[in-house]
């Protein structure tokens, strides 16, 4: 009985690993990062995200007050880079947006606090739709601009996801090399 051995070289294994990572990424990672925050009447609520450099970040935030939907409380917002640079600052608003492309890798922080409201307000609820990288891309405008649709648009999205995964893997490899001793 003849046995056939299958030999896999590095050039064959790497695309298989990337395909597996892509499948996991699609199944596990949500398309957008929308969260609800309870903003205390006194104090600040912050969220942070570790992001690579040269990544597009888009966010929308809005205050929700079920008790008084016609007059929701106002909030103030501030977004800073890992080195403390101010990327967005808005005072006394019920909704807002920010967008930027990261210039350095690290923790980007968005902080929210209740604005100077004339009425005493209890805690407020804030909706935050934070989109990063692939999720931040406006695929509808890409489709219109390039006059593509259907399968071709889906392939472009997948290609962008693979590129994003590849960049994240390189970033993680670089970071792990900083902490692990060479063999």
Image (tube, helix red, strand yellow):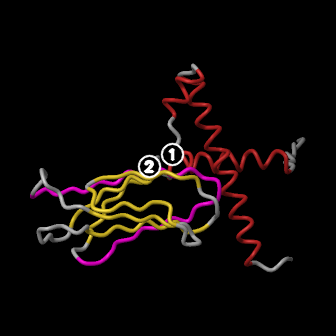
Q: Locate residue 172, reporting x and y percent.
A: 68, 64
Name the disc covering residue 110, or none: none
In screen coordinates, is 80 left or right of 15?
Answer: left
Residue that numbered label 2 is attached to: 32
Q: Outermost residue, right direction?
A: 2
Left or right: 161 as drawn, with respect to 178 = left
Quarter of the image with the N terminus is: top right
Residue 173 picture quarter? bottom right
Local SS, label 1: helix
Whether residue 107 is in magenta: the answer is no
Q: Which residue is mark 1?
A: 135
Q: What secondary structure predominates along the stretch shown in magenta?
A: strand
Q: Quadrant of the C terminus?
A: bottom right
Q: Position of residue 22 (x, y in %)?
A: 62, 46
Foreground pick, 123 / 88: 88
**Neighbour class for label 1 at 10 Å: few (<14), some, many (≥20)?**
some
Magenta region, residue range: 42-67
For label 2, the SS is loop
Q: Identify whether 53 is placed above or below 4.
A: below
Residue contact at pointers 1 and 2, CB within 8 angstroms: yes
Q: Residue at x 87, y 47 (%)?
A: 7
Q: Residue at x 25, y 73 (%)?
A: 40
Q: Earlier in the sequence, mark 1 or mark 2?
A: 2
Q: Quadrant of residue 52?
A: bottom right
In the figure, is residue 52 to the left or right of 47? right
Q: Is residue 156 above or below residue 73?
A: above
Q: Residue at x 35, y 56 (%)?
A: 128
Task: Point out residue 100 in the picture as x, y percentages from the top left corner.
Answer: 53, 53
Q: CA distance from mark 1 to mark 2?
A: 6 Å
Q: Nearer the viewer, residue 97 or 166?
A: 97
Could you classify mark 2 by the number of other residues whose Cα lies within 10 Å: few (under 14), some (14-19), or many (20 or more)? some
């Amino acid at each position: 009985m003849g046995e056939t051995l299958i030999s896999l070289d590095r050039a064959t294994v790497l695309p298989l690993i990337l395909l597996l990572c892509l499948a996991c990424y699609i199944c596990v990672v949500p398309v957008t990062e929308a969260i609800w925050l309870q903003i205390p009447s006194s104090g600040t609520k912050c969220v942070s995200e570790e992001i690579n450099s040269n990544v597009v970040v888009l966010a929308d935030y809005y205050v929700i007050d079920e008790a008084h939907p016609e007059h929701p409380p106002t909030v103030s917002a501030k977004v800073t880079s890992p080195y403390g640079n101010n990327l967005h600052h808005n005072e006394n608003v019920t909704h807002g947006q920010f967008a930027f492309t990261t210039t350095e890798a690290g923790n980007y922080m968005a902080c929210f606090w209740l604005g100077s409201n004339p009425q005493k307000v209890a805690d407020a609820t804030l909706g935050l739709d934070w989109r990063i990288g692939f999720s931040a891309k406006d695929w509808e405008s890409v489709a219109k601009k390039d006059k593509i649709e259907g399968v071709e648009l889906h392939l472009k999205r997948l290609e962008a996801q693979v590129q994003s995964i590849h960049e994240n893997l390189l970033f993680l490899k670089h970071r792990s090399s900083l902490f692990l001793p060479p063999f």
